[in-house]
Each structure stands twice: as C-alpha cells, then as structure tokens.
C-alpha cells in the first residue's frame, strides 16, 4: 500500500518540518513566477525546470534540505537569487 502511494518508509520516518516545508514552497513559487520571463536560453529553463521537479519531489518526501538545494540551484540557473 505504501509503495502504491509513492511513499517510502524513509519518507514516513522523517518528521515534517513546517519551516523547511514553507521554504520549499516559497522557492518553488519564486521559480514558477519567474521562469517565463527569465533572460536565459530555453534549454537552460528546461534543465532548471527539471531540477525544480526533483526538488519539489524531495520536499514532498520530507527531504527538505536536498529539495531546497535543488530549488536554489534551479533559481540560480535562471539568474535569480533565492529569496530563502
């Protein structure tokens, strides 16, 4: 049942960190709000978008630090300074 829901025992064992969860959402939203108008090549936007997807998945799995690192990297790739 857990595997069918896409959850691992590791993810379930990790506690929800509300502050880090909010940071994940904030970074993801910053990217979404800015990627269309970013002054970078389309292939850079595509690569950064893939990184955001991975970061969002990590955050959803409560691996906040890894997720935030990926989200920050994606923002830097499109020329932005992460706001958190």
Image (cartoon, rainbow, N blue to C red):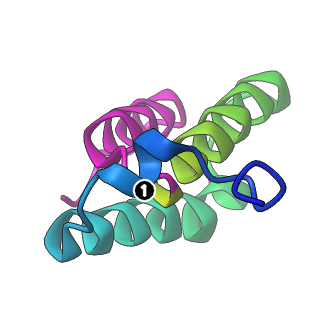
Residue 33 image offset from top left, x and y in percent = 58, 71
Question: How many numbered tags mark residues here?
Answer: 1
In the foreground, 12 or 31: 12
5 with respect to 60 (left or right):
right
The residue that appears at 63% across and 41% down in the rendered structure is: 39
Q: Which residues are magenta?
A: 61-84
Is 17 above or below relative to 81?
below
| Residue at the outermost front position | 1
> Residue at horizontal 36%, vertical 71%?
26
Q: Residue at x 23, y 61 (%)?
A: 15
Nearer to me, 7 or 43 = 7
In this rendering, position of residue 13 left or right of residue 61: left
Q: Residue at x 84, y 55 (%)?
A: 4
Residue 60, how many percent across, how many down?
Answer: 51, 59
Q: Is residue 49 above or below residue 5?
A: above
Residue occupied by mark 1: 12
Q: Secondary structure at mark 1?
A: helix
Is residue 26 found inside the magenta-colored segment of the image?
A: no
Position in image of residue 44 (x %, y %): 71, 25
């Amino acid at each position: 049942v857990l595997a069918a829901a896409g959850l691992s025992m590791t993810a379930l064992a990790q506690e929800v960190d509300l502050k880090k969860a909010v940071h994940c959402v904030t970074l993801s939203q910053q990217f979404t709000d800015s990627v269309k108008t970013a002054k970078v090549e389309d292939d850079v936007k595509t690569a950064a978008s893939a990184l955001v997807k991975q970061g969002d998945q990590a955050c959803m799995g409560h691996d906040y630090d890894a997720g935030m690192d990926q989200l920050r990297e994606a923002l830097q790739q499109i020329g932005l300074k992460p706001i958190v």
